[in-house]
Image (tube, coloured by chain):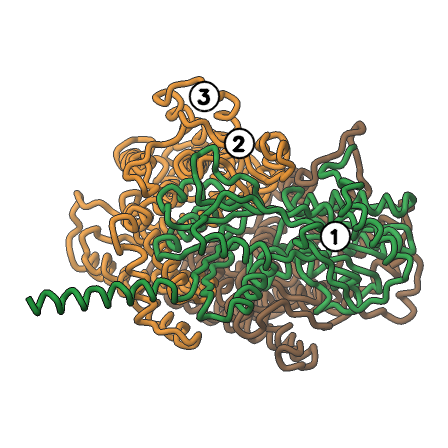
Amino acid sequence: MKKSLLLLLVLSLLAFGSFANAQDGPFRVAIVMPSSITDISWSQSIYEGLLEVQAAMGGESALEIAYTEGMFDVAAAADTLRGYAEDGYDLVIAHGTQYGTSLFDLAPDFPETSFAWGTATDVGTDAGLTNIFAYEASAEQGGYVNGVMAGLMTESNVIGVVGPVAAGDALLYVNGFVQGAKASNPDAEVLVAYTGSFSDTQAGTDVANTHIAAGAVVLTGSSQMVVGAIEAIQSAGGYWFGTQSDQSVEWPGAVVVSQVYNWAPTLSDMIQKVQAGELGGTAYNLTLENGGQTFVFGKVAIPADVLAAAGQASADILSGELVVARELSE
Amino acid sequence: MEGGRTLIDILVAVSALTLASATPFLYAALGELFAQRSGVLNLGVEGIMLMGAFTSIYVISDKGFSAHPTVGLLVAMVVGALRGLLMAVVSVTLQAEQGISGIGLTMFGLGTSTLLFRVLAGGVIVAGGIGPLHIPVLSDLPVIGQVLFQQNVLTYGAFALVPISIWLLNRTTWGLQIRAVGQNPTAADAMGVNVARVRYSTVILGGALAGVAGASMSIGLTGVFQDNMTAGRGFIAVALVYFGGWSPWKVMLGALLFSAANNLQIWAQVLDVRIGGAAIPPNLLIMLPYVLTIIVLIFARDRQRREPAALTKPFERGEN
Amino acid sequence: MKQHKQLAERDPVALLAPVVAVLLALILGAFILLALGKNPIEAYGSMLNGAFGDEGRIYNTITRAIPLLLVAVGICIAFRGGVINIGAEGQLLIGAITVTAVTVAIGENLPPLIFIPLALIVGFCAGALWGAIPGYLKARFSVNEILSTVMMNQIAIQLVLFLLTGPLIDPKEIELGTRLAQSARLPEAVGLMRLAPPSRLHAGLFVALIAAVVVYLLLWRTPLGYRVRAVGQNKDAARYAGIPVSLYIVLALTLSGGLAGLAGAVEVTGVTRRMVEGFAVGYGFSGIVVALFGRLHPIGAIPSAFFFGALLTGAEQMQRTIQVPSATITALQGLVVLFVVSSDVWVRRRASRRAAQAVREPAAVEFSIAAPEAK
């Protein structure tokens, strides 16, 4: 009789203990990225967002972050995502649209794990899934405002765009940029050239040098290879408009402003939802309106009228009066 | 550079940019040429270039040692030479299959450069390195002044390497040994030439030059280092050795052709060149340099291609 | 003068040497891990766990090995035929994109029994074409295959990007405005059957194994294969014996390309189920490594591919568990390759000593590493 009472006591203590422990222990997030966390663009911006959230939550004891970068091969990424899910992470983020198909194969097998992917809009409702978040960014909005400013700051009326591949986030940004530049300066000539690669830095330099030779004094571009282009325009004494991450840190002389993604609110929201038991179903969009996109100004002095025009453009987008098209009409 | 859009302006700009962007190809291809003339195929050039690009800029940047640019160049040469030594040990002494050893070396170079980059620098490296040198008087000449005499110091070096290579290969004893070893190592060995030593020397030289090629990209042309920035140029350089039929000046022509085609396709994008009003998809333009290289080779082929007969064949005395 | 290196198949040292080499490489890798502040025991423990830890993980390892095996078998043909094929990257992509284009165009109309073989044949033929071009260029115009395959790889990459951002882009992407570089999802009917759900192990395994056996039989049991190998061993002697050397060079590259294209087809119908940017990156080069680890024999490629797959999945688990930078994996792979390739000399020295002593048995299958022939 005493023994079973003792056993009952021990068991209930254990149960209480494990219940208490279930509330303790960090929230575990894993993220898989196609490029490195030092790419000053796509991957770095979300990684820094995670670090922000971690700090706000109270450090590593509250939020544990595991990451795998440089996963440009889709099949390897699929295995990695599965591996993190198997290792019991609470939220597994697939930070690349190319990971989508793998994610949808994976999510049904781990109903207790929350998954997120972007840029994307599909949360799997058609497939009957409830544990997928999706996120995208309306990069054309930030691109537009950048373009408005660029149009007014180009003394030669020539602007150059250094693009990687005409797809996804980069394309949205470029299209927005071109519209913005034309809106603020109809005489501006916007030259666009692509390198065909997300990582070929020398190609970024080559394209930038060609733009400069063609008269451009203002450049913009997207993806990790633009570091070559930024250096080129800085050496030539021109300006750069950045995207996805604050690019003024290394190039204070050239970067006017960077349109950056503010991932922290989105990530916090996801984490809170997961902690409350809601594992998916929301599609996020980083816009100017919800603060998902913000502007980080560099050290370059900006004329008052340019700032005013940018402010006006932002206001118009926020109020809904101006809707930036995602496609360029030919 | 002034921005102007007349045909002359464009040709001048393209020519100047072509000479500049041919620089890494020249260093790497000429280095590989020496190795191949002695009979060793080194596909590890890509990895060595990356290590050279990283080490040179790291050393001169303030994330590293803020050293003088020349030091950066020397470091790249030494690192490249050491990598070349590794390749020489594996392919000449241990006689491993050369193509695969080269690929292993490239993988190793890619991995270590990225790893060191992350651990030591923690982020993109930006450093003013070796810049353009305007040759006094000559650089003020119209047209050719801008094209020829306002280039980067390393570019001048790359083109100077062409006649130097020709001289080394054809007018020195070492050059004679290299060619003999590449054509008929058994006979060369019988004549008292130390085949292994000759191959070591060329592969190490090739490595050092590949290191310089990488440095020319980071501290010379772009002023930055980012992950995997060579993006396959090492393999293009190896291909250019075949294109040039193992002759330094033809390799130079190949590098110029390839760079010119690349710069022209960028201009075609920039100027929004259209065919019958329809925009040309950028990816199709980007593939032009590669297509052109093959086409030119078809038409310009030399009936007497002097491929070193012993290329890729390890040599062991007494075993034929 | 041609050099022949022959290994007796049954020499246990020949099989042991690569294992020792791998161990040496991993020991060196342990120093790198220590320098990064990580515990090598924990690291390698997680590596073994990642590759073989449980049933699911083993299936994963096999899944990753499938395309490598196919590419490697193709490389075997090329090397045995005396050509260096570093164009497998491009041939694989062309195979995959062609399958994507054809199957998306046909839609759901065909039953799997017809659709799947059709897709595989299409992939093989597309890759074969991409391999035939360098072959023809070499035979007819003496364009060296290293040059042409390097160029064709880049051409293939840009061609695929063009198609995925243009004609073959998923209509849903245009609709949603997200404009990602990927194709529509392939029809279900063309998906290769999953052998052991929830893992992604798929029927492509059988395709790869059958291909390895078929190529072995082709190379060693048919007159065609004999001639391919003869050209690879000594072009001049083959020509003297009346073999049309040019034709067999083209054939070697064509078949090699076809197998790489088949790898692309299998990967896109079995694993990714759509064509994306970032497809099969690096498989062309890994396949070369696998082929050489397998002593350039199609059957040897089977354990070799499995080993390499284990190296990949194991290293990735290691990265996840101890959180080292992903570049560590590439550096380790490079070390392994360098060591294994260097161990070759030891094996050959043993083999030539044995050959000098013993009488050679005519029935023994001979391995020979054919070095590319000078013109």
Q: What residue sits 62% from the left and 37% below the top?
A: C165
Q: Amino acid at mark 2?
A: Ala
* Spot occupied by residue C97 in the image (x, y as percentages of width and height): 52, 34
Give whichever of A105, A207 is nearer the camera: A105
- Which residue in the structure is indicated by mark 3? C108
Q: Which disc number belongs to residue A13?
A: none
* Spot occupied by residue A227 in the image (x, y as percentages of width and height): 69, 61
Q: Amino acid at mark 1?
A: Val
Q: Are marks 1 and 3 on the same chain?
A: no
Colour for chain B in the figure: brown
- Rounded to the nearest whole Å, what is the CA distance between mark 2 and mark 3? 13 Å
* Spot occupied by residue B4 in the image (x, y as percentages of width and height): 91, 51
Give whichever of B170, C35 is nearer the camera: C35
Q: How many marks?
A: 3
Q: Which chain is green?
A: A
Q: Is residue A262 left or right of residue C39?
A: right
Indicate the chain on which mark 2 is placed. C
Q: Secondary structure at mark 2?
A: loop
* Spot occupied by residue C108 in the image (x, y as percentages of width and height): 45, 21
N-term mark: 2 or 3: 3
Colour for chain C in the figure: orange
Q: Is residue B242 left or right of residue B155?
A: left
Q: Is residue C167 left or right of residue B197?
A: right
- Which residue in the structure is indicated by mark 1? A207
Indicate the chain on which mark 3 is placed. C
Dot 2, how many residues are within 10 Å of its Cα: few (below 14), some (14-19), or many (20+)? Answer: some
Give whichever of B62, A94 is nearer the camera: A94
Dot 3, how many residues are within 10 Å of its Cα: few (below 14), some (14-19), or many (20+)? Answer: some
Quadrant location, the N terminus of chain B? bottom right
